[in-house]
């Protein structure tokens, strides 16, 4: 398809759907009400398009989108693309869930409350933690929730001022650093030693009575499990810091090892990763926070209590942290995650972990036959858990083709290879994470595509660099989107800047002489 | 001991014993356990997770889940006037079709090439919102309206370098808590009370507290009492005069009936897209938007991704890419603006479908229907003995607050429920001085007969 | 995608879905039952594929299919491709319909029965007929139903032997001729005069006391409405024949003219054409039969009766013809058709007709600018109703490119142009039927594609002939599928014939010396 | 007068007044009415069709439809043992996903190029069925099992040139009526009674009536009494010996448990695919299959389309096309074989998905579960005083017939319904000599507890 923008479709007078008109009695009331005075003069400036035409447009766009349901989706960075069982869509989309309002009386939503309660229990079991909050809207929101808890915990103990630093590692997700910074912490980032792991000494040097928390992932985005994790946690505890475990991708360790065993105070899971809820182009997602009994009073969102009349939602009391979002969490995803766990049980979760790890090591074995790529930090080390950060620096050295350019060529194979792991600590990085969801034949297919693309890079680097060819669109000039003069953040902006449409911009705030001069980062691209 | 399965679990193809054995051979290990060599024994979890046993077939899973869900009573089965941040608007069927398309549902971080359609759909969403809000810059959806308001305020704090913000008290209590916590350490939140008679923020109240320490004034329209703020231009003037911003929380769906606050001088608009074809989902369907004018001072303060339209190497072809990606924490970790992560992209696409379907006239008709139903409900209920509408004569849209004499909020709720009606959200935490005041919401799905039923029920409860 | 057959996917031990295993009590009963003796020895020879893998496979195949939801679908012959409203899918797919069994007690299916009853009334109104049966599974099945009624009617009057001929026209759907033949009738086919219409004299010459019925379409597949239809019906009635109206595509005349006004005894509608139910790759469909009061007793399927206890299904009595299919009809499509009618009402149906006709005439106007194509029979005649049979004989004469070849090239534009109108009374035929469902912009797009493809044919006929290029697949060698030695009607047959798989074929019937020698038709291809 | 709409109906884009006017101008007429010049006034329908008024919004339509549908009580909400040609088997979720994909749902007559995926999916369906049935040729689905049986018999009549067919009386009455009517004029249908003791067709009964006038013997397994026919080889031998065919109606889902009758010498298999993931749909979800060996004598007698796999101009690529299209009425009108039209293609695709999901072991387990449940139900019910299972000792699969003493079929049905159970289809029209006999069906969705509930209810009714 060469599908135009929705703004190019339609004609005056077309309608996509008809809405209910007001009853005469209501209209009459309106005519006498104060509302008449505030009513807008002209209709809004939206396109007018018939129903089948709107449908056709978005269906075509959907076909130009490469969902995990359609491709061997193991190359999207650390995204844990696994199968989201279709049957769970029935439950998440059931009228019995969709058509409930969050403020309905608990007696009318016992089914949902039981699901949430059982999911809390399951997450508690998987993590070993004492209490769980399901309120966070996504993984990063859960990290924010954890940082809020850290802040409240130390404030509660009178150490809020003193503890103004958070320590994290470069191979933990950027949101660990970024949420801590947003909460007002100074961020100390540890870089790995030659084995890809944090060194205990370096950590000890970074820790002090100013440390509020250690935010860490394990296995980190390199796929390497840090065997010294218990010692790391102990070291942080020694200086009075809390330890927060980013378990976004817990896929490879379900039923194998838990936050509890390593001594963590807090942890979180991305339900759209490990627990299979679909990624939805980037959300809605859902996050779960696990806490020890000591930290439970600080959890955000309501406590789910089972009483004589069934389940109800209860305020957690004075020490609870502020809500992360409206209401109780991303319920459709909580339902999906619960159903996924129930379809697998304890044995099934362990099988998930084991096969994810097997698949990952299988891909690494197969990729070892391809020239120009190497698993970072893994020479001679223990086998990786459920992902590997590879480096294509060999290929880049030989051909000049970067891993990002290789990724563009992979689009022609109907596959993803995402390389956005800023900063590039591993040169020309690409993380492959096969999860448990793909068949061996599919893993082979992916490896073969990488093999072919890298061979092409050796034969004709320019050919790869100008890719994609068979995709819906050609190489985009991203340069123009970094400059305020030329960027176009909406069709409205494009019309004004490029098509010369005359837009009246009302008077509004503008910086004055005493406004701060904000530092700008160097321009950077997504790939 | 765990039994060796003869067959794979349907979700785990390589658990098929033959395949698994061959793969182990390729890897060169005898057992998966060898692959866990890096995990010390002391950290190993022994035994089996304490989970209910697996439901062994899809039949059993469906029976279990449907059995649980059947214990809910839906707002669709009854008559509901619940609102307070989540609204029962009609969801056109096409929204569901697109929202559930396997491609959109299961896509993720793909680039402009392999996920072109996703980029275009989200760009169209931001563009439709831009047209609706009358501002050029709209973010790829963040989590929800709470987050949008909190981030909008922090944007103002950064832009002005000031450490106080004024926030209307006609804002839901949980949202205010979110804002306060999110601004902690960055700015102090000062409450700006709405006038109890007119239900709105009056310019004199703003004037009183405005100063060169104030980064922004934040108010909502319609606000938590359902009242439409009518003096935005004056308030914008006061804020701008003192070097501060006016930030408006706005219901996008109301803009079929009301002017965009941008036209009154608001600098940042923010809010939630739940009403735009997402459904209620027990409060699980939210997405946040932030909109500004196209000026770099604003744009560089967005933490979210912004999608831009750009030429490709093919003549005349337009593609999509990130705008000023270096703003983001994905690019810069803690040096980025706040943070960005997976949030609510598909809800954005769905809202785009919704706006495309309704178009200007659908939105305008829907806006009128809601306004008419709201006014009709106010007129029906204000005449009941013992019921007092807060600021009944102010313009309202969708919601209105009622104080009952001699009946607690809980009594009203339970009385209604007994009559098959959901409603009466207490405003105790929002506006404690208003006593046992409760909120009702009406939408386009209500007929005047539905509203009559509510009024009659209230009459019965008050009798 | 270059998607392999499902047989190439999967591995031993993979599972797509788990089914319930028998309870121990039941297993024990089974072990003692007679069933053990008849149990098969080996499992069946099906592939073993994981759930996500099955899903991915069929999703990819779906993307390689050009549904009306995705394309400007106005070139599929006389297929009346219109918009099937998505909201109707909710009703057809609702558990309240899907999970009902046809033999449930009527008191438990009042909702469905009311829908069927109201749909019968609506079809009666649209056709003007007195009674309606919704049992037929599709349009051709409804024609069969009508032929059965014709046969039963004459048999009932003692004229069954005498009336052994059915008269039809070449521009009526082939099923009119074919069902009549199947029912034992000799088929007399009338060809049109120069104006594309049946001549009354020719008809009179074909009619006799042997004529059981006249089966006729109007407007015929040419799009031309025969103004003499009432005289034609009268002529048939004069010789004692019944008149059966094939209203498969009634799109252009809804609310304009009806079977009743022209005097027909029977008629039928294809609900998947005029009444918008989706075409589903070729069914399930649904047909409705309309009959005069005189013929009502012969209708197939039960009579829907409204009694004091609500609706019930009742036997029509001794003269009812045999059921066309199991139970009461293709209920999901009947629900869709009912919802479609309710969304439009009488005014809306008329608007459907008027815009369908306008769209058709608009396309004809636009196509008149394209060289090499002409609307058959329409020079100087009345405007066509809702479709036009065009002839590309001009293009074929100039370039040698047939309309079938042109259609293959149109696949590269993501569009259909179907030409299977055997026999080719109109040379190089192609029928375009825009219906009411497409926007002007879309009609223009289709005309532009035809313009471009025909221009290409003039520049480089071979280029068009070798098309498609951008489709999922290349030009297929259909020749091998016409020869018993080489055709492969299943993967099993392919494995045996081409891959040398050894298959044991059990002893079975084979023709003996006294078996009849059956005449074979000359080989013919679909396009 | 009809009012001129300002806006288009959502389903009719060009009814937008501006567009419509421009199009009329392009066509060169002033009014649409001019385009109807060919329709004489006498034939014009005056006035407005007598239809209920349009539901003016999607909200209203959905409310109306859901209101109607809510008046049904589903088999899912109760416990159902209804069968007799439509069965409550489990429908895996993936079947629904593929069945409702917009592309498959709305495609139609496209060729191997633009609709490649559809051709492949249908070819895979016929191939999966071929593997299951153990025959090489399977048609693109025709309407249903009734049609499949009727056509299979006519195929035999054409192939043999004979004018008599023998049809078992353990075939549903409506199906027999369909067969008789479809063969009218082509062949005479002679009823072949099943043995009342064993519930099956015994070879001696076939022998008795077999002759050189008989084109084919038709029987079903499991038959309408739920009994598995066990003497197919002997019957095939008798038929073949006299130059006739053996045609078997077969439940494809049962072939996870039973051998294909092809292995016993059946020449044509036919039946319905409703059980293969289609759902019940109040009897609206059927598709027919006919399978034969790959011999031209058979193949040329198929009226349906047959899809074949064929090379393309690209080396190694395989595409799809029609096999011997000249057989069809689409190609040859009345000179084709019977007729072919739109029938049940998407149900075929869905059945293909079903078979792919279950695979050999799923089918085998499901077959066993059904067999076990059937036997368990027979054993539970046969011991009830006043209940007699027809041919209780014969092998059964899924269905069984019960005769009750002192209770009519209607009394049993109503007694069960009062206890929240659907069941007891009377066999009065099928086998009038068996009196008030009723049919029950069990499937894999039933547990032994469900069956106990049925048995207990029957005990209560008989008490």
Image: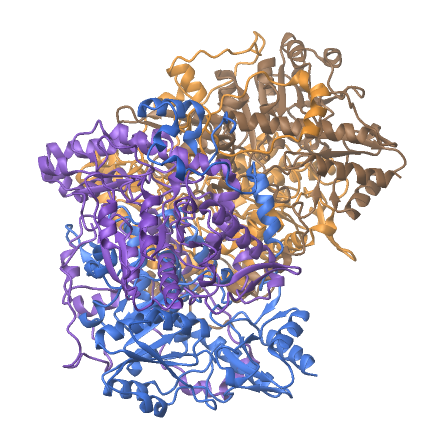
Chain colours: A purple, B blue, C orange, D brown
Q: Who is closer to the viewer here, D430 or C484?
A: D430
Horizontal side of C521 relative to C404 (left or right) equals right
Q: Position of residue B261 (x, y in %)?
A: 33, 79
Q: Where is the C terminus of chain C found, in terms of image quarters?
A: top left
Horizontal side of A125 relative to B22 (left or right) equals right
Horizontal side of A78 relative to C237 (left or right) equals left
Q: Who is closer to the viewer here, A15 or A218?
A: A218
User: For the view shown, which residue lies furthest in the front direction?
Assistant: A238
Q: Is residue C482 above or below residue C343?
A: above
Q: Position of residue A51 (x, y in %)?
A: 42, 59
Q: Is residue D303 above or below residue C428?
A: above
Horizontal side of D432 relative to A430 (left or right) equals right
Q: Position of residue C236 (x, y in %)?
A: 60, 44
Q: Is residue C35 above or below residue A63?
A: above
- Residue at image point 41% right, 78% down: B257
> How many discs appear?
0
């Amino acid at each position: 398809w060469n599908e135009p923008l929705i703004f190019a479709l339609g004609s005056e007078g077309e309608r996509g759907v008809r809405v209910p008109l007001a009853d005469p009695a209501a209209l009459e009331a309106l005519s006498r009400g104060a509302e008449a005075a505030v009513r807008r003069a002209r209709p809004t400036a939206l396109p007018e398009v018939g129903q089948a035409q709107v449908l056709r447009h978005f269906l075509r766009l959907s076909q130009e989108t490469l969902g995990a349901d359609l491709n061997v989706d193991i190359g999207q960075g650390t995204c844990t693309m696994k199968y989201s069982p279709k049957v769970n869509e029935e439950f998440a989309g059931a009228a019995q869930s969709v058509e409930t309002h969050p403020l309905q009386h608990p007696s009318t939503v016992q089914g949902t409350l039981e699901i949430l309660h059982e999911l809390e229990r399951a997450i508690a079991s998987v993590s070993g933690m004492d209490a769980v909050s399901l309120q966070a809207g996504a993984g990063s929101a859960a990290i924010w929730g954890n940082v809020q808890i850290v802040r409240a915990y130390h404030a509660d103990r009178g150490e809020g001022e003193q503890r103004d630093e958070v320590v994290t590692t470069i191979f933990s997700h950027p949101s660990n650093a970024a949420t801590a910074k947003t909460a007002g912490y100074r961020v100390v980032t540890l870089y790995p030693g030659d084995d890809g792991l944090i060194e205990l000494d370096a950590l000890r040097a970074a820790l002090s009575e100013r440390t509020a928390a250690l935010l860490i992932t394990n296995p980190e985005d390199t796929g390497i499990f840090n065997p010294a994790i218990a010692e790391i946690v102990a070291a942080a505890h020694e200086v009075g810091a809390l330890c927060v475990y980013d378990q976004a991708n817990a896929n490879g360790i379900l039923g194998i090892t838990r936050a509890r065993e390593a001594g963590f105070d807090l942890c979180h899971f991305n339900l759209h990763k490990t627990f299979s809820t679909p990624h939805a182009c980037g959300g809605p997602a859902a996050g779960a926070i696990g806490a020890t009994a000591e930290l439970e009073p600080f959890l955000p969102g309501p406590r789910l209590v089972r009483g004589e009349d069934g389940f109800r939602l209860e305020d957690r009391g004075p020490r609870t942290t502020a809500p992360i979002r409206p209401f109780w969490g991303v319920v459709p995803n909580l339902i999906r995650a619960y159903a996924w766990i129930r379809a697998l049980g304890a044995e099934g979760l362990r099988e998930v972990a084991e096969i994810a790890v097997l698949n990952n090591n299988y891909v690494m074995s197969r990729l070892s036959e391809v020239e120009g790529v190497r698993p970072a930090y893994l020479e001679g080390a223990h086998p990786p858990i459920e992902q590997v950060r590879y480096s294509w620096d060999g290929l880049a050295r030989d051909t000049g083709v970067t891993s990002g350019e290789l990724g563009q060529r992979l689009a022609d194979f109907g596959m993803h290879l995402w390389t956005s792991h800023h900063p590039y600590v591993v040169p020309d990085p690409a993380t492959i994470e096969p999860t448990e969801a793909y068949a061996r034949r599919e893993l082979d297919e992916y490896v073969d595509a990488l093999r072919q693309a890298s061979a092409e890079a050796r034969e004709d680097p320019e050919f790869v660099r100008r890719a994609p060819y068979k995709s819906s669109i050609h190489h985009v000039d991203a340069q123009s989107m970094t400059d305020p003069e030329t960027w176009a953040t909406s069709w409205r902006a494009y019309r004004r800047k490029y098509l010369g449409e005359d837009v009246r911009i009302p008077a509004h705030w503008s910086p004055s002489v005493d406004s701060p001069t904000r530092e700008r980062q160097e321009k950077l691209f997504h790939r | 001991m765990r039994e060796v399965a003869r067959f794979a679990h349907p979700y785990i193809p390589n658990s098929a014993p033959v395949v698994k054995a061959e793969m182990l051979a390729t890897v060169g290990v005898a057992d998966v356990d060898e692959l866990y060599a890096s995990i010390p024994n002391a950290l190993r979890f022994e035994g089996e997770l304490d989970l209910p046993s697996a439901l062994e077939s899809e039949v059993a899973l469906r029976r279990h889940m449907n059995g649980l869900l059947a214990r809910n009573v839906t707002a669709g089965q009854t008559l509901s006037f619940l609102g307070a941040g989540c609204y029962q608007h009609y969801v056109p069927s096409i929204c569901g079709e697109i929202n559930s398309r396997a491609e959109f549902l299961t896509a993720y971080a793909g680039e402009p090439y392999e996920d072109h359609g996703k980029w275009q759909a989200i760009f169209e969403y931001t563009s439709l919102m831009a047209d609706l809000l009358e501002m050029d810059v709209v973010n790829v959806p963040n989590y929800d309206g709470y987050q949008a308001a909190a981030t909008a305020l922090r944007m103002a704090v950064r832009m002005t370098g000031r450490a106080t913000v004024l926030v209307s008290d006609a804002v839901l209590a949980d949202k205010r808590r979110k804002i306060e916590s999110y601004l902690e350490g960055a700015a102090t939140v000062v409450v700006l009370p709405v006038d109890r008679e007119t239900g709105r923020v009056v310019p004199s109240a703003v004037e009183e507290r405005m100063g060169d320490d104030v980064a922004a004034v934040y108010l909502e329209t319609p606000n938590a009492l359902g009242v439409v703020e009518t003096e935005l231009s004056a308030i914008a003037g006061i804020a701008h005069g003192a070097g501060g911003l006016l930030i408006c929380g706005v219901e996008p769906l109301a803009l079929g009936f009301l002017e965009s606050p941008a036209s009154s001088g608001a600098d940042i608009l923010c809010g939630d897209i739940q009403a735009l074809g997402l459904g209620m989902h027990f409060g699980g369907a939210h997405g946040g938007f932030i909109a500004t004018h196209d000026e770099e001072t604003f744009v560089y303060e967005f933490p979210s991704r912004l999608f831009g339209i750009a030429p490709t190497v093919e003549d005349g072809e337009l593609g999509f890419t990130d705008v000023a990606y270096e703003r983001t924490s994905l690019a810069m970790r803690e040096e980025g603006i706040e943070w960005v992560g997976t949030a609510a992209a598909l809800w954005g696409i769905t809202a785009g479908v919704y706006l495309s379907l309704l178009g200007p006239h659908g939105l305008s008709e829907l806006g009128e229907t809601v306004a008419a139903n709201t006014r009709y409900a106010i007129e029906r209920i204000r005449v009941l003995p013992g019921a007092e509408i807060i600021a009944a004569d102010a313009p309202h849209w969708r919601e209105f607050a009622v104080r009952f004499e001699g009946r607690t909020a809980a009594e009203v709720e339970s009385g209604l429920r007994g009559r098959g009606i959901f409603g009466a959200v207490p405003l105790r935490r929002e506006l404690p001085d208003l006593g046992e005041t409760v909120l009702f919401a009406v939408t386009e799905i209500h007929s005047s007969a539905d509203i009559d039923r509510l009024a009659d029920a209230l009459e019965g409860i008050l009798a």
